Structures are given as C-alpha cells and as structure tokens.
Amino acid sequence: MPHVETGMLVGLFGGSFNPPHEGHRLVAEIAIRRLGLDQLWWMVTPGNPLKSKRYLAPLAERIALSEKMATDPRIRVTAFEKALGLNYTAEVLDRIKARNSGVRFIWIMGADNLRDFHRWQNWKKIALTFPIAVIDRPGDTLSFLSSTMAKTFDHARVDEDDANTLGRTPAPAWTFIHGPRSTLSSTAIRKENGLIKD
Ligand SMILES: Nc1ncnc2c1ncn2[C@@H]1O[C@H](COP(=O)(O)OP(=O)(O)OP(=O)(O)O)[C@@H](O)[C@H]1O
Ligand SMILES: O=C(O)c1ccc[n+]([C@@H]2O[C@H](COP(=O)([O-])O)[C@@H](O)[C@H]2O)c1
C-alpha cells in the first residue's frame, strides 16, 4: 500500500483500467479538486468480480498504462489487491482501514457503478463504513435517483456543493458530483483496437 501520513484524506479509485483512458484521468482530477484530497490511490484490480476476464489485459500492462495516464503528483498507481489475494472491494477496504488508523478515506466511483452497487459483495457494509463520491457519467446520470443504493441511503446524501466536507462526515455519507463529463469507455477503446472479436 502507498505511504500515507496521519490526518491525510485519501481517495480510493478502484478500476479495471482495461485500458485506462482520459475519462479515468478526468474522474481523478474532479475527485482531487472537489473532495480536497491529499492523495488518490488509483487501484488497478486483478479483476472486477462481476465482469468476464475474457478480454482482461495482464495486470502489469494495465499498471504501466495507468502510470502514463496518471500524471498528477497526488496520484499513486497501485495494485496491492493482487498481492493481498483479495477480489472484493469490501475486503480490500477492511484491510486498508485496519492498516491506516488516523487516515480518512473516500471511495470513488463512476455513476455506472452506482447503478449496480447493490450487486457488490457487502455493499451496505461498504456504505456504512466509508464515505462515497460518485462522479457523473454519460448514460448513468439518473442513477443518483433510481439506483438501489441512492434510495437506500437517501438520508445520507451530501449536497455536492459540500463535497469538500465529505471526508469529515461519518458514514453513511455520499455525494453525486456533476461536472465535465467524458463519453470514453475501455470497452469502446478495445473495440476500436480490434481487441474484442464479437
Ligand atoms: N467516462 C467515465 N466517466 C465517469 N466515470 C468513469 C468513466 N470511465 C470509467 N469511469 C469509472 O472509473 C472506474 C474504473 O472504470 P473501468 O476501468 O471499468 O472503465 P470503463 O470505461 O467503465 O471500462 P469497461 O468499458 O471495460 O467497463 C469506475 O468507477 C467507472 O465507473
Ligand atoms: O466487491 C465487489 O463485489 C465488486 C463488484 C464490482 C466492482 N467492484 C470494484 O469496483 C471497481 C470498479 O470496477 P470497474 O470494473 O468498473 O472498473 C474495482 O475496484 C472493482 O474491483 C467490486
């Protein structure tokens, strides 16, 4: 895990990054600025438990491309989930919390993941333990109203104008951040590059 100092606020941005693209860079920039992060951990997953691994590039390749994409000095590209043998975000977050007392964390994800968040293992526990920032994504803007997570934790929603207080707000607490959006997706890039055959 990257080194972090007591009192810091760290954004946790997990993803397949297969491959990383400018949309990811935009999410990281928005999160750093709007949430007031000291660091953002760009966590390259060994594999999203809900996605097929058929077209998943090797972890080393996804890390190397992420390092080129993530140029902000506050970003740490990391892949410790693999070394810890963990696949599920709830387990990973437990481990991060246990190893970093005195550090505050916010889980960061795009709006497509808010739509499906109730399918993640122990999703309620995640929301009850960590503040969550959701960044808008074309096609999934309405998930901030219609998703199971949004309905279940409606009482815990923080106005996006107060996003810079999220890191100090005890969970459950989440916000949906609108802003510049990117239509990019890794699937579209894989298709353009002929990496998806069907
Ligand atoms: N254009 C985008 N706008 C907002 N969030 C995004 C965007 N692209 C990816 N994200 C978010 O970044 C994180 C990592 O995404 P991921 O690596 O799965 O990229 P993807 O483009 O969604 O990939 P795929 O097309 O393979 O599903 C997720 O939380 C996802 O919601
Ligand atoms: O823990 C789960 O059940 C779970 C289900 C789906 C996605 N995730 C995590 O969500 C992050 C975003 O995944 P992805 O594929 O949309 O980039 C990544 O860290 C995944 O490991 C986690």
Image (cartoon, helix red, strand yellow):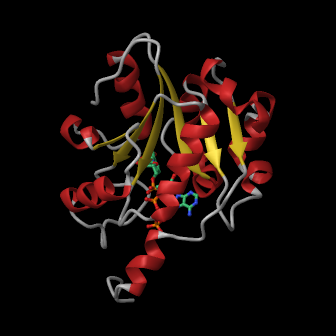
Residue at the (73%, 51%) spot, across then down: 178
- Quadrant of the drawing holding the N terminus: top left
Is residue 166 rendered to the left or right of residue 154? left
Residue at the (38%, 78%) spot, across then down: 190
Q: Position of residue 179 (x, y in %)?
A: 70, 53
Q: Position of residue 196 (x, y in %)?
A: 36, 83
Q: Write down the quadrant of residue 163 in the picture.
A: top right
Q: Which sits in the foreground, 87 or 23?
A: 23
Q: Write down the quadrant of residue 85 in the picture.
A: top left
- Residue 102 higher or lower than 53, as above or below: above
The number of callouts visible is 0
Q: Position of residue 60 (x, y in %)?
A: 19, 57
Q: Which sits in the foreground, 28 or 158?
A: 28
Q: Write down the quadrant of residue 90 in the picture.
A: top left
Q: Position of residue 173 (x, y in %)?
A: 68, 27
- Residue 181 higher or lower than 93, as above or below: below
Residue at the (47%, 13%) spot, across then down: 7
